[in-house]
Image (cartoon, rainbow, N blue to C red):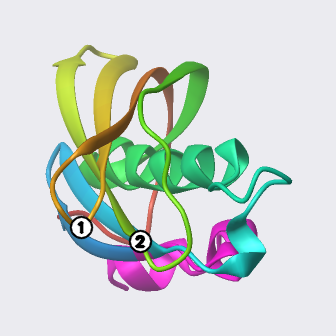
Amino acid sequence: MTPQEFFKKDRFAEQTGVELLEVREGYSKAQLIITEEHLNAGHRTQGGAIFTLADLALAAAANSHGALAFSLSSNITFLRGSGPGDTLYAEARERYIGRTTGYYQIDVTNQDGKLIATFESSVFRKGDPLPFRV
């Protein structure tokens, strides 16, 4: 099973339209094409959609070692708005890996490479094996 197949089981991210593009050990990249369904009342991309994109990128990078990982805490900072027609990318990078914990930074950018949001998260590795390892 590939990481892309495994993370299709993340039904919320799948239904939101998040697509996992790349997974390497400690790294992943995901994308979300913004449509009318992703907008808030102000006609901008809803923060939850951006969080979901970053969270799936986090999950793929954190689980790339083949052991089930869960987020302990996450923080997102929104820097720039986006809207319909934008393509957002989340790139997750592992900054620390311990025996049972890890720390990740995720940049969310648009199709022009402009920074939309930053996302940081710490994870706990439960140790349960996954059906893939990159």
Q: How far across and how far down the image is residue 132, in percent?
A: 33, 70
Quarter residue 86 falls in: bottom left
Q: How far across and how far down the image is residue 58, in percent?
A: 41, 43
Q: Is residue 12 magenta?
A: yes
Magenta range is 1-19
Q: Earlier in the sequence, mark 2 or mark 1?
A: 2
Pointer 2 and pointer 1: residues touching (CB < 8 Å)?
yes
Three-letter residue code for mark 2 = Asp
Three-letter residue code for mark 1 = Gln
Residue at x-position 29% and y-position 27%: 105
Up/down of 58 relative to 7, above or below: above
Q: How far across and how far down the image is residue 19, in percent?
A: 44, 78
Q: Which residue matches tag 1?
A: 111
Q: Which residue matches tag 2?
A: 86
Evaluate whether residue 10 shows in this view: yes
Q: How far across and how far down the image is residue 94, in percent?
A: 20, 31
Residue at x-position 52% and y-position 45%: 55
**Mark-to-mark CA distance, 2 and 1:** 7 Å
Q: Is residue 6 magenta?
A: yes
Disc 2 secondary structure class: loop
Q: Quadrant of the C terminus?
A: bottom left
Disc 1 secondary structure class: loop
**How many residues crowd around disc 1 within 10 Å: few (fewer than 14), some, or many (20 or more)?**
few
Quarter residue 84 falls in: bottom right
Residue at x-position 28% and y-position 53%: 64
